[in-house]
Image (spheres, rainbow, N blue to C red):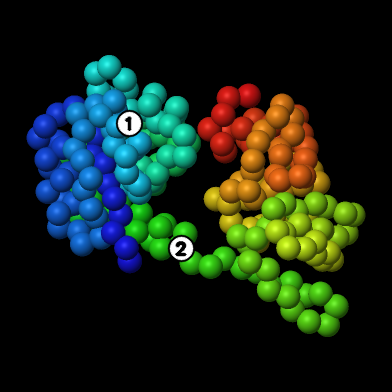
Amino acid sequence: MKKLNCLIIDDELYAREGIANYCKEVSFLNIIALCKNVLQANHHLEKNQIDLIFLDINMPMIQGIDWLKELKNAPSIIITTAYEKYALESFEYNVLDYLVKPISLKRFLQAVNKVANYHSNLTKEKFLFFKIEKHLKKINLKDVLFVEAMQNYVKIVTTDEDIIIKMPLKKLKNQLPIEDFIQTHKSYIISKNKVDKIIENTIVIGTYHVPVSVRLKSSVFSSFKLEV
């Protein structure tokens, strides 16, 4: 697999160097910078494509968890901290693993292998086959804009065509990867990567306007790291 560009953020020098030494033992990790605070990290995020951040939580100036809440389009995150109490909250923010100091090499390798598997799956082509009349049609999920329920059918709107399939929306939802799709309304599921704008209770995808229901608004906004 391609190397993953990493940032290490920790206010303690020995902790930064400890993670860096572990990273050097892993062939697919490429250290971009060691940062003593999140302000330094912001600079490197602007200049480089970062795939993975090792993030301490308890730091001066800005706490790691507070920075993470505001980080847009966050890369994969591995928390490295002496405190267990933030574990549950941290997993709301694209955190793939949570390492409690002192961190053993074995535990570190488990975490980075999880990240490697995650990125490997991202690069694979994602598709589904659907039965249409007497044949099976392959639909690449990267081409899907949104799905609309139509009683016992669904309409899959793609970049090239609209496809009508006899299937309940709930059943189709269970087949779609949750990292790429989210339900916005009882009758709609959208591709998160295709969203152009969010205007109040409406998702704009190209020329389409997809409603966001009151019941689902909180989860939809949370998936984009937005406040309701």
Residue 19 image position (x, y, % from top left): 17, 44
Front in this rendered view, residue 85 or 216:
216
The structure residue drawn at horizontal position 83% and vertical position 52%, both measured from the top left corner, is 149
Front in this rendered view, residue 212 or 151:
212
**Which corner quadrant holds the N terminus?**
bottom left
Decide if residue 168 is in sight here. Answer: no
Q: CA distance from mark 2 to mark 1?
A: 26 Å
Residue 26 image position (x, y, % from top left): 20, 59
Question: Which residue in the structure is indicated by mark 1?
Answer: 42
The mark that comes first in sequence, 2 or 1, is 1
Say above or below: 187 vs 37.
below
The structure residue drawn at horizontal position 53% and vertical position 32%, both measured from the top left corner, is 225
Q: Which mark is residue 16?
A: none
The structure residue drawn at horizontal position 57% and vertical position 38%, both measured from the top left corner, is 223
Location of residue 208 by image quarter: top right
What is the three-letter code of the residue carrying label 1? Asn
Decide if residue 60 is in sight here. Answer: yes
What is the three-letter code of the residue carrying label 2? Thr
**Which corner quadrant holds the C terminus?**
top right
Location of residue 199 by image quarter: top right
Question: Which residue in the structure is indicated by mark 2?
Answer: 123
Q: Is residue 212 left or right of residue 70?
A: right
Say above or below: 32 vs 141.
above
